[in-house]
């Protein structure tokens, strides 16, 4: 249940490794880049390509919390809940998000725009509280600042 | 040897061991979870913490993990150090944070390693006040129940299932506190050793699903030492009974045989004992056949008397699934010349040949423990995974000696499991398989050769010739085959302990002789090498030792009118010979007496059916493939007239007015008589303490001292406790009273020790961890090769096999679940039995134009035509078809043999048959 293009990319990837299974995490990322998440069907298809059992590949997939095994919104928002951001009251951001978008940690907005997830540390303690949307890092956040940023993502 | 100091006392211990193993061997109670005596150390749970001191002046010390630390000479540790104790209690507290504390409703309760360790560390009060993580449980098939909330994440299950048993459909998911052990979705756990998870899991995540249906606490189970009856390896078991039904099978450690594990056929095949096909009382059938009617023992005896009235008119058919004693009793009743071994003619010949090879030597038959040390293996014509599963599990663990040396040069010991696996880079000992059909070990093999049985035998002889003279020395051998012969010979020669395995399962005498030729060559050229032959059933080897004529000859005797009465011992002849032949045999007998425990097509034809005991209700002796005689003991007293077959036959001997059996009061008497009559069974008299053995004047209790409800369980009929039954045959008693200490190894009814309620209590019964039981592992070998190499008859190398067009060579296929007669009667095993099929390689099927699932007509000479569905089997050689042996729904055909196949015409519109 993956496209020929995904298969081609995975085959290309496999050529860089001594064993097929070593390509597992990256192959899952390829599928996720194309689909936003890794469904059971996609996982099975990748496992077949890598000559792994579903269990073997899924144990890798579920170990990494940035491989999504459930559908996510168009944009994934990671809010840092580590110690510096905790001191800097990241919980105010969470409350704000809950008020404005009606989501809590692990939830997706009904319009499929955002999925909110925690991150253990974004490496931006000097700009706490911090968050990351897709690939972009934002620091020194306040509820107002957040509203402006979120407006950029549709 | 090394001297180590534990709490300032010196102990002399073996070199190169880890501290945990050493401490447990010395008898200390040091708690652990992730470590397992067969799977060794990974250092995951941090439970076995001890204090390590630099020298005698060091008083602070540091905490280390005992399982990951080498017990070096002079090392000083403390188990009792307060800081170490506190640390261990803290670890248990951490592990327990999400554990549901549901012991009262947990099947593991009362035999739980987690309970034991929690008590041992002294973690009594829970400090954790927060929400616990919970999981969804999975359906895992008929054998195991799943309850993930109890998990403490020790990782033993995946380490056993994937790393040890080679399974691929169980794994660890997620991370941290949410780690989940299971499948990627609900479904049957495929691996045939999955049942061991119930014993490997230290708590109640994986529990025995069949036991759950008739659950009893361990302390309420009546148990006795027993031997598995579902293949010829003779794994030692502990069956447990309550209220007259068999509840479960647990592993019984025997260092020389099964070690810590059982296969699922052995663990779950037991349900036939409780099955509705059991023969529970004597049955009489009128001369015209028809429905049998229950009768009293008196009626049965008088009918027996009528049938036996003329001496010399009697023949007996023995059985490879009946005990030595029962077969011997029958042989005594009918006389040596009128005793027929109840197996097919092919099996009788092959067994006799294999036995003779082992007795003649020079190669010796190794125990499973010795097989564990082999470092190059060549399997010839045997599907070990499906005929003798635990041997396959043993073969999965073999590591080449040079790899062990390499790891040691890196300061890595084999017990350091993860590092060791990394050091050897998953390299297994060379394993070569040559067989007519794909086998369960093919994926693990270095190289596989599939060809007709004769071509497989030719490869074996070629290997022998290369070993002897450096060249295959055989005409017409294809280049690739002679190359393979050279490679195998080289691998065997280079190994320190090469092993050749073959067996009866391939159905070919040439393959057995080929295996013998290799082992002879290895012995004479290199002075090393062992030879193992696998036999089909639990006492096939015993029956081979006892001898007996063929079933065809029995037919002859009856046809010529030299006999009119047939006594059949625990045997369904319809799985031994083709139906027409069995029909002829049964029709030519005037009287048929069957002694058996389960109804089958043969017992339906008997005029008199006598109820025999199964392994759980009677005692006796079985001889395994190694040639090891082992005693199994009655677990419980059955209702009514069920008793050991030999006791029924003893009655027959007495009724015939003869005195031979008059002295057989107890099992030891008949075993003694057998040893006097046939000296090869002399060692049987020494396999266990005699019936009058006592410790401090007491018998050994089958019930634990905590057994409960013994008055309540009969209260609906009588409030007085009934008198316990007496067991004349053994020093074991059917009570909870008796000697409370450790019994001699052959008589251990269960593993329990104060503070150790789980299966891990076996630690306390061993001379050293994973070593022999205290007092020696039970069983006596009956076969040792004769001294000196005798000249063997010249090799009979078969010609290369050619098949005519339209002719197919039908070869036997085996299934762990399906091939064995008794286990398929167990409802859980029955769920795993495949539907009958005929296997063809896809290329052949394509050329025949037959699709998978379509039916074909199978025509074998002299046998009824069978219609059977085709299944594709990759790896079958062209021109070879496979048929599962003894699978319910598949007619008995002598295999291998040449057959023809007819593809029924398809109807034009549907394409279906």
Image (cartoon, grey):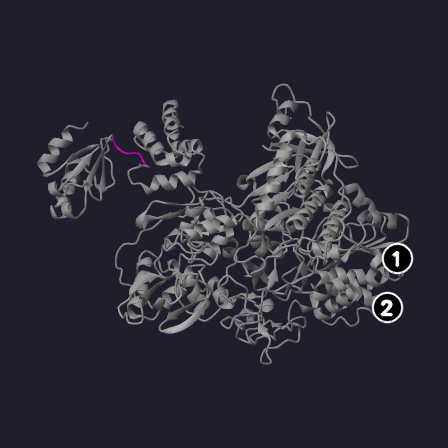
Q: Dot 1, crowdedness within 10 Å: few (<14), some or many (≥20)?
A: some
State which quarter of the image contains the C terminus of chain B.
top right
The residue range painted magenta reads A69-73
Residue B173 screen position, x and y as percent: 37, 44
Q: Is residue B271 above or below residue B505?
A: below
Closer to the camera in the image, B682 or B759: B682
- Chain-order first, disc 1 or disc 2: 1
Q: Is residue B18 visible?
A: yes
Closer to the camera in the image, B446 or B145: B446
Farthest residue toward the top?
Answer: B908
Label 1 and label 2: CA atoms lie apart by 15 Å
Residue B411: name its quadrant. bottom left
* SS category of the residue bearing label 2: loop
What residue is at 32 percent from the left and 56 percent from the top?
Answer: B98
Query: Residue B657, which numbered label?
Result: 2
Residue B664 screen position, x and y as percent: 76, 70
Query: Residue B550, which numbered label?
Result: none
Is A49 one of the magenta-colored residues?
A: no
Instruction: State the residue position of label 1.
Output: B313
Closer to the camera in the image, A123 or B149: A123
Residue B546 screen position, x and y as percent: 76, 58
Residue B652: name its quadrant. bottom right
Q: Is residue B415 above or below residue B297?
A: above
Q: In the displayed structure, does residue B519 sit left or right of residue B376?
A: right
């Amino acid at each position: 249940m993956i496209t020929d293009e995904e298969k081609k990319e995975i085959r290309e990837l496999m050529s860089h490794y001594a064993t097929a299974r070593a390509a597992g995490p990256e192959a899952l990322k390829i599928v996720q880049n194309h689909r936003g998440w890794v469904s059971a069907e996609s996982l099975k298809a990748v496992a077949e390509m890598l000559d792994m059992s579903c269990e073997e590949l899924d144990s890798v997939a579920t170990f990494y919390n940035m491989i999504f095994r459930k559908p996510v919104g168009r944009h994934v928002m990671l809010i840092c809940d580590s110690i510096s951001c905790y001191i800097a009251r990241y919980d105010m951001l969470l409350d704000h998000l809950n008020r404005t978008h009606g989501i809590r940690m692990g939830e997706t907005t009904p319009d499929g725009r955002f999925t909110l997830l925690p991150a253990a540390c974004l490496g931006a303690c000097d700009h706490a509280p911090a968050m990351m949307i897709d690939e972009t890092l934002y620091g020194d956040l306040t509820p107002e600042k957040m509203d402006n940023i979120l407006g950029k993502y549709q | 040897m090394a001297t180590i100091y534990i709490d300032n006392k010196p102990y002399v211990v073996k070199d190169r061991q880890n501290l945990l193993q050493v401490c447990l061997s010395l008898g200390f109670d040091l708690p652990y979870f992730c470590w397992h005596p067969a799977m060794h150390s990974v250092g995951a749970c941090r439970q076995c913490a001890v204090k390590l001191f630099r020298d005698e002046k060091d008083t602070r010390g540091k905490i280390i993990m005992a399982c990951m630390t080498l017990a070096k000479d002079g090392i000083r540790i403390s188990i009792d150090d307060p800081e170490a104790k506190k640390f261990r209690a803290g670890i248990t507290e951490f592990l327990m944070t999400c554990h549901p504390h549901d012991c009262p409703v947990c099947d593991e309760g009362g035999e739980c390693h987690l309970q034991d360790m929690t008590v041992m560390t002294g973690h009594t009060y829970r400090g954790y006040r927060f929400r616990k993580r919970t999981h969804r449980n999975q359906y895992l098939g008929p054998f195991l129940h799943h309850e993930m909330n109890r998990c403490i994440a020790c990782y033993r299950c995946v380490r056993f299932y994937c790393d040890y048993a080679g399974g691929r459909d169980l794994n660890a998911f997620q991370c941290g506190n949410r780690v989940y052990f299971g499948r990627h979705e609900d479904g049957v756990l495929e691996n045939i050793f999955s049942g061991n998870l119930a014993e490997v899991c230290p708590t109640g995540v994986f529990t025995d699903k069949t036991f759950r249906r008739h659950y009893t606490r361990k302390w309420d189970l009546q148990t006795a030492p027993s031997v598995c009856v579902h293949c010829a390896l003779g794994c030692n078991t502990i069956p447990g009974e309550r209220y007259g039904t068999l509840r479960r099978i647990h592993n019984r450690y025997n260092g020389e045989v099964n070690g810590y594990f059982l296969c699922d056929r052995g663990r779950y095949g037991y349900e036939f004992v409780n099955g509705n096909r059991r023969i529970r009382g004597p049955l009489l059938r009128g001369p015209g056949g028809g429905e049998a009617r229950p009768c009293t023992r008196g009626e049965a005896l008088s009918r027996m008397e009528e049938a036996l009235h003329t001496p010399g008119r009697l023949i007996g058919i023995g059985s490879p699934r009946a005990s030595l004693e029962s077969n011997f009793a029958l042989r005594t009743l009918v006389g040596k010349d009128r005793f027929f071994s109840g197996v097919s003619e092919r099996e009788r010949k092959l067994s006799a040949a294999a036995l003779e090879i082992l007795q003649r030597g020079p190669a010796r038959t190794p125990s499973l423990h010795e097989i564990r040390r082999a470092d190059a293996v060549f399997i010839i014509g045997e599907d070990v995974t499906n005929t003798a599963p635990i041997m396959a599990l043993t073969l999965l663990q073999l590591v080449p000696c040079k790899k062990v040396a390499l790891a040691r040069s890196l300061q890595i010991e084999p017990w350091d499991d993860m590092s060791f696996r990394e050091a050897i880079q998953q390299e297994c000992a060379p394993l070569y398989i040559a067989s007519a059909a794909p086998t369960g070990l093919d994926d693990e093999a270095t190289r596989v050769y599939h060809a007709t049985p004769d071509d497989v035998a030719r490869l074996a002889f070629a290997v022998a010739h290369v070993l002897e003279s450096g060249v295959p020395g055989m005409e017409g051998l294809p280049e690739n085959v002679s190359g393979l012969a050279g490679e195998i010979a080289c691998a065997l020669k280079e190994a320190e302990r090469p092993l050749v395995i073959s067996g009866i399962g391939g159905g070919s005498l040439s393959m057995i002789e080929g295996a013998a030729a290799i082992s002879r060559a290895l012995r004479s050229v290199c002075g090393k090498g062992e030879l193992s032959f696998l036999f089909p059933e639990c006492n096939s080897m015993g029956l081979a030792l006892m001898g007996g004529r063929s079933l065809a000859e029995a037919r002859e005797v009856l046809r010529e009118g030299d006999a009119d009465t047939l006594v059949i011992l625990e045997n369904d002849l319809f799985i031994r010979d083709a139906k027409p032949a069995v029909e002829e045999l049964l029709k030519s007998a005037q009287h048929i007496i069957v002694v058996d425990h389960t109804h089958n097509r043969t017992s339906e034809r008997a005029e008199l059916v006598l109820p025999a005991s199964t392994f759980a209700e009677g005692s006796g002796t079985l001889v395994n493939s190694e040639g090891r005689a082992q005693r199994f003991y009655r677990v419980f007293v059955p209702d009514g007239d069920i008793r050991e077959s030999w006791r029924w036959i003893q009655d027959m001997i007495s009724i015939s007015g003869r005195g031979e059996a008059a002295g057989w009061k107890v099992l030891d008497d008949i075993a003694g008589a057998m040893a006097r009559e046939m000296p090869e069974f002399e060692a049987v008299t020494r396999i266990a303490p005699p019936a009058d053995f006592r410790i401090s004047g007491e018998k050994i209790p089958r019930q634990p001292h905590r057994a409960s409800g013994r008055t309540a369980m009969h209260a609906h009929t009588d409030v007085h406790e009934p008198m316990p039954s007496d067991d004349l045959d053994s020093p074991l008693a059917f009570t909870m009273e008796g000697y409370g200490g450790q019994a001699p190894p052959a008589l251990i009814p269960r593993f329990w020790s104060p503070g150790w309620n789980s299966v891990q209590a076996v630690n306390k019964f061993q001379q050293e961890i994973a070593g022999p039981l205290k007092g020696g592992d039970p069983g006596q070998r009956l076969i040792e090769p004769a001294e000196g190499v005798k000249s063997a008859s010249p090799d009979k190398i078969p010609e290369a096999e050619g098949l005519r067009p339209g002719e197919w060579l039908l070869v036997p296929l085996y299934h762990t679940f399906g091939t064995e007669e008794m286990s398929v009667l167990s409802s859980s095993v029955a769920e795993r039995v495949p539907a009958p099929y005929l296997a063809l390689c896809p290329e052949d099927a394509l050329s025949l134009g037959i699709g998978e699932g379509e039916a074909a007509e199978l025509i074998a000479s002299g046998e009824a035509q069978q219609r059977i569905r085709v299944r594709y089997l990759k790896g079958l050689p062209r021109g070879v078809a496979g048929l599962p042996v003894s699978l319910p729904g598949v007619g008995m055909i002598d295999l291998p043999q040449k057959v023809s196949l007819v593809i029924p015409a398809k109807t034009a519109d549907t394409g279906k048959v």
